[in-house]
């Protein structure tokens, strides 16, 4: 190493001498902050090691000399530290703080930590500054706290278990003792800044707070919290650097210290009302959970378990967050930020296994109970609105389904599971009823109902997979069995339960599917068989059957995609009865439309989910008749059958589309559509007929035939291509034909237009992929090119034609200008 | 609404580029055939352009290094403006042309270019037409066009 790179001999001594003089001189310059900056820079240099190449070409690397320098600094600045004038003391402290900060990227031995920690602690206590104009008491004590913050955050250079244990202990103790000293006799600072805590509404909080902290103004509390955070960072840094785990015999001692520290840190939160400090503390508590977790994988006794209960007790009063930022929110504190920080603490469950092993409360169960109170408040409390409940459901989802994919549902205890089911069901029912409200409230209720169903489905699916079957029984079979009674008595009053159970059937897993079909589908089919009369209950039962068949179809498709084969088929024992009951309802001449509508929609799902091997030949024939009958109904007229026509167009369209798509493909389960009889019927009779009638003129106010074709088209790309190509060809034929007229072209174009608008993206895509779409435009553009006189006539489209001119145009071209403007779809308001 | 729904979404890029090229080649129309073509293609182009949020990425570059779709659209603006102001042509097609102008200026604005393509239209075409208008009909057309242009200016400046 050259002489230029090595600091000159005695440089440290010179620098220390300079700093001592600066501290002792009776002048504002240099300021404490400037001195701190200088010392930080100097010690940052000192922290690096020095490499030397000897004359024998041997490389030597020195240990960094920062520790000796720190000790020397404390010694040499002694006169400044003990000077009568507080200004000197303050400057000296800032030099020391800067020096320690400069060493933050290295490690320190326990000895120097002990030396500096004790030294700084001695400056944290109250100081008499009555003779001074400035608040030296605060400034000196704050500087000491900053020094402690710096030293506790630096990892230890110790390697042995004893040294590491000592390093942990010192950081935790210095942190807490520093706060205690800082808070001592702080009555002069009482309430100076606390009146400026803004935007936070009064809350009924735990009153167990440390008296000193509560009287400190916000900025000083924040310094204390910074010290807590730094100690936690120091613990984390030491833990990360450990080459092996601590000896088992030493672990209880460490755990005891960490538990006590964690309790004290949680205690800091009680009574905190300033949002900035609150956010800071919540962040620190979460860091503490993460940093201490590696040391709590197991505990010797239940006193050495990580104190999640204390942390929960401290943070729970702040849920849900009630904070409105002030108009000039310069600090950027938001409700969402506070909520996120709070949720991070409440959803940290990694230390729960240890707590569970010692029969302690877990954060999982405690937080679940807290969130459930929002959904199902205790009697006397105000019932939160849908927005608050949406937040609670979201919190539950994040708690029970963490991002790392850990399965937690099986860690819930039985009472919590029961409460969970009750709360979610009640919230679902309440929000479902609220969907009819107008505006945002109705939308929020709908979203809430959806979220409830999603959450309960996910829970059910997970519970199916856990070894402890009692959990699934508690959450699924027990409560659902209680629902059957109402279902049997009056399906129309159990619509919400039907929807709920059907949702579970669709997403809850194979066991749940079979169970829900047994208690739901079977019950409703029995009801329909015995009560095939014209009542609301029968109509609700028919719709309910459809819901369960639809759920079964969804569940089976999902299982198939996951490579799971459900054997026996879930509908095997219900198929025949369902088919018979539904077809009887559809074809009855005495029953009213609502039941027929329900039966029609239910039959769609039956056809899509049941294989023909479960039905007899007679029933397959009846299904064919049903399909034909639907086609006939579409062509009937009358407002009274509109609802049935709508149901028929949806069902028929789906059957046609799925059948032509080739449902027998490997990706989808087998269904009645794979029956040769039904497939041939659809392909050769139903589809061509439907296509043809959709291209005919009709006076019907709603074209259900076209709607059916749109539904079929939306089923798959292949079907869309075929339908769009047929309609395009038909339009081109009409445009080019000398016998066609405006009207037939227009009807043909209207049919195509309907498909483009309602047939999904696949239909539009099919249109553009077809070469015939270009041919149509060419045909329109050049329709008058065959006749010179017509060119002139068409060119004058801006001028109103005479009746005679119009007749000439139509006679010679076959297409009039009015039609061209119609086919290109001009808006009437233009 | 008949065929234009097909052009409001899912229009392949090459179809749009071809359509814009065909329209830009015949604006303003110089023959009855051109007029018929515009009568058919302007509403479709208008529907397609108004449904876009930005110019699609096109790897077909024009001779000046500007993508051809952007070039064709920008170059047809004067012709479209004259077309809209002229009483010779069908009012529905002229409305479609006005939609095209609005859509093109919005898309150009999203590119963040500083040169507004609307100002030359105001200076060289709309203003002179307004000053030389002799009938109520012509005056109304010019004022309507001016109002549309002012709206496009606001959109343009907001985009930049």
Image (tube, coloured by chain):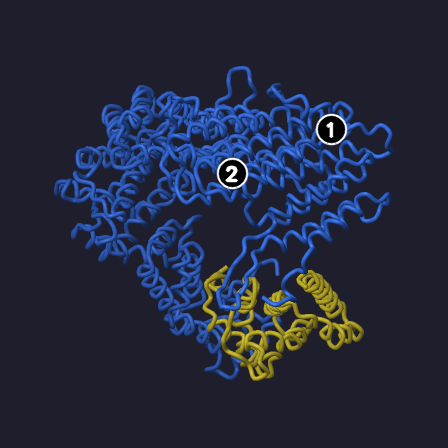
Chain colours: A blue, B yellow
Q: Residue at x 48, y 30 (%)?
A: A431
Front residue (pair A313, A572):
A313
Where residue A761 appears, as percent x and y from the top left, is: 42, 58
Chain to which the residue tagged by mark 2 belongs:
A
Residue A3 is left or right of residue A692, and the answer is: right
* Image position of A314 with respect to A601: above or below: above
- Reply above or below: A354 against A2: above
Q: Quadrant of residue A607?
A: top left
Residue A722 lies, with reference to residue A444, above or below; the image says below
Give the residue pinned by disc 2. A235
Callout 1: chain? A
User: Where does the C terminus of chain B fall, quadrant-wise?
Assistant: bottom right
Say whether disc 1 or disc 2 marks the residue closer to the N-terminus.
1
Left or right relative to A503: residue A232: right
Q: Are marks 1 and 2 on the same chain?
A: yes
Which mark identifies residue B90? none
Instruction: Determine crowd level at label 2: few under 14, some 14-19, many 20+ residues with C-alpha closer than 10 A.
Output: many
The percent position of residue A128, horizontal first and vertical second, equals 80, 27
Secondary structure beneath disc 1? Answer: helix
Question: Percent x, y for residue A785?
Answer: 48, 81
Camera-side mark, 1 or 2: 2
Q: Badge 1 is on which residue?
A: A194
The residue furthest front is A56
Is A353 placed left or right of A466 in the picture?
right
Near-viewer residue (A700 or A331) = A331
Q: Position of residue A425 (x, y in %)?
A: 41, 26
Instruction: For label 1, count other residues whose C-alpha is less than 10 Å away and answer few (under 14), some (14-19) or many (20+).
Output: some
Q: Count of labels shown?
A: 2
- Quarter assignment of residue A515: top left
The reply to whether residue A489 is in sight is: no
Farthest residue to the left: give it.
A617
- Secondary structure, mark 2, is helix
């Amino acid at each position: 190493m050259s002489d230029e790179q090595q600091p000159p001999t005695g440089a440290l001594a010179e620098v220390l001498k300079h700093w001592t003089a600066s501290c002792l001189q009776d002048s504002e310059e240099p300021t404490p902050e400037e001195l701190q900056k200088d010392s930080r820079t100097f010690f940052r240099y000192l922290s690096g090691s020095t490499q030397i190449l000897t004359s024998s070409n041997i490389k030597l690397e020195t240990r960094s000399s920062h520790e000796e320098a720190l000790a020397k600094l404390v010694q040499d600045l002694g006169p400044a530290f003990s000077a009568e004038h507080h200004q000197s003391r303050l400057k000296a402290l800032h030099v020391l703080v800067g020096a320690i900060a400069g060493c933050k990227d290295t490690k320190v031995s326990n000895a120097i930590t002990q030396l500096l920690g004790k030294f700084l602690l001695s400056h944290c206590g109250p100081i008499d500054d009555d003779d001074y104009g400035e608040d030296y008491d605060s400034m000196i004590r704050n500087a000491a706290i900053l020094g402690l913050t710096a030293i506790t955050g630096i990892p230890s250079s110790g390697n042995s278990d004893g040294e590491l244990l000592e390093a942990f202990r010192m950081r935790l103790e210095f942190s807490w003792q520093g706060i205690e000293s800082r808070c001592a006799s702080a009555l002069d600072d009482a309430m100076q800044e606390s009146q400026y805590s803004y935007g936070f509404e009064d809350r009924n909080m735990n009153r167990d707070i440390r008296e000193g902290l509560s009287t400190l103004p916000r900025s000083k509390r924040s310094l204390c919290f910074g010290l807590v955070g730094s100690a936690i960072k120091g613990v984390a840094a030491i833990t990360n650097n450990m080459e092996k785990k601590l000896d088992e015999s030493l672990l209880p001692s460490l755990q005891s210290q960490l538990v006590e520290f964690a309790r004290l840190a949680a205690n800091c939160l009680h009574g905190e009302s300033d949002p900035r400090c609150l956010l800071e503390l919540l962040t620190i508590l979460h860091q503490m959970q993460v940093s201490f977790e590696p040391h709590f994988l197991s505990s010797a006794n239940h006193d050495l378990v990580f104190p999640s209960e204390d942390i929960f007790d401290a943070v729970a009063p702040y849920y849900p967050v009630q904070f409105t930022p002030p108009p000039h929110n310069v600090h950027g504190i938001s409700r969402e930020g506070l909520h996120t920080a709070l949720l991070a603490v409440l959803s940290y469950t990694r230390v729960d296994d240890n707590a569970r092993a010692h029969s302690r409360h877990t954060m999982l169960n405690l937080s679940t109970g807290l969130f459930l109170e929002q959904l199902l408040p205790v009697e006397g409390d105000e019932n939160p609105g849908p927005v608050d409940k949406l937040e609670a459901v979201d919190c539950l989802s994040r708690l029970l389904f963490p991002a790392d994919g850990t399965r937690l549902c099986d860690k819930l205890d039985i009472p919590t599971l029961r409460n969970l089911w009750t709360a979610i069901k009640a919230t679902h029912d309440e929000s479902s009823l609220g969907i009819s409200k107008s505006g945002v409230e109705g939308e929020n209720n709908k979203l809430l109902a959806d979220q409830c169903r999603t959450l309960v489905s996910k829970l059910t699916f997970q519970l199916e997979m856990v070894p402890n079957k009692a959990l699934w029984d508690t959450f699924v079979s027990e409560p659902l069995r209680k629902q059957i009674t109402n279902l049997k008595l009056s399906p129309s009053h159990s619509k919400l339960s039907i929807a709920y159970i059907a949702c579970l059937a669709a997403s809850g897993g194979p066991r749940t599917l079979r169970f829900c079909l047994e208690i739901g589908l079977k019950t409703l089919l029995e009801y329909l068989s015995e009560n095939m009369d014209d009542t609301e209950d029968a109509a609700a039962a028919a719709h309910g059957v459809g819901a369960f068949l639809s759920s079964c179809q969804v569940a089976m498709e999902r299982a198939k995609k996951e490579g799971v084969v459900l054997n026996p088929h879930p509908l095997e024992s219900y198929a025949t009865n369902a088919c018979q009951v539904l077809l009887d309802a559809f074809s009855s001449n005495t029953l009213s439309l609502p039941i027929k509508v329900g039966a029609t929609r239910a039959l769609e799902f039956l056809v899509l989910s049941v294989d023909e091997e479960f039905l007899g030949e007679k029933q397959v024939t009846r299904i064919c008749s049903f399909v034909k009958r639907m086609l006939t109904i579409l062509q009937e007229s009358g407002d009274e059958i509109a609802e049935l026509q709508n149901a028929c167009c949806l069902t028929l369209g789906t059957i046609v589309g799925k059948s032509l798509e080739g449902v027998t493909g490997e990706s989808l389960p087998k269904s009645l559509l794979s029956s040769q009889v039904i497939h041939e019927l659809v392909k050769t009779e139903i589809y061509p007929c439907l296509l043809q009638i959709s291209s005919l003129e009709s006076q019907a106010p709603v074209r259900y035939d076209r709607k059916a074709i749109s539904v079929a088209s939306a089923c798959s790309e292949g079907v869309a291509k075929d339908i769009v190509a047929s309609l395009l060809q038909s339009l081109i034929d009409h445009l080019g034909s000398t016998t066609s007229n405006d009207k037939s072209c227009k009807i043909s174009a209207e049919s195509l237009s309907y498909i483009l608008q309602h047939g999904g993206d696949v239909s539009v895509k099919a249109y553009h992929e077809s070469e015939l779409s270009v041919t149509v435009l060419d045909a329109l553009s050049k329709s008058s090119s065959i006749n010179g006189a017509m060119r002139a006539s068409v060119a004058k489209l801006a001028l109103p034609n005479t009746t005679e001119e119009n007749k000439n145009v139509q006679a010679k071209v076959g297409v009039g200008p009015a039609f061209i403007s119609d086919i290109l779809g001009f808006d009437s308001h233009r | 609404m008949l065929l234009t729904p097909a052009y409001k979404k899912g229009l392949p890029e090459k179809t749009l580029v071809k359509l814009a090229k065909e329209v830009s080649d015949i604006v303003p129309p110089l023959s009855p055939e051109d007029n018929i073509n515009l009568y058919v293609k302007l509403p479709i182009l208008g529907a397609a352009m108004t449904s876009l949020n930005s110019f699609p990425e096109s790897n077909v570059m024009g001779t000046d290094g500007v993508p051809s779709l952007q070039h064709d659209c920008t170059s047809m603006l004067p012709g479209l403006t004259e077309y809209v102001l002229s009483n010779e042509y069908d009012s529905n097609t002229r409305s479609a042309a006005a939609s095209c102008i609005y859509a093109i200026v919005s898309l150009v604005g999203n590119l963040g270019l500083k040169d507004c393509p609307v100002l030359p239209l105001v200076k060289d075409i709309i203003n002179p037409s307004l000053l030389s208008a002799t009938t109520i009909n012509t005056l109304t057309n010019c004022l309507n066009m001016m109002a549309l242009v002012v709206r496009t200016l606001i959109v343009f400046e907001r985009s930049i």
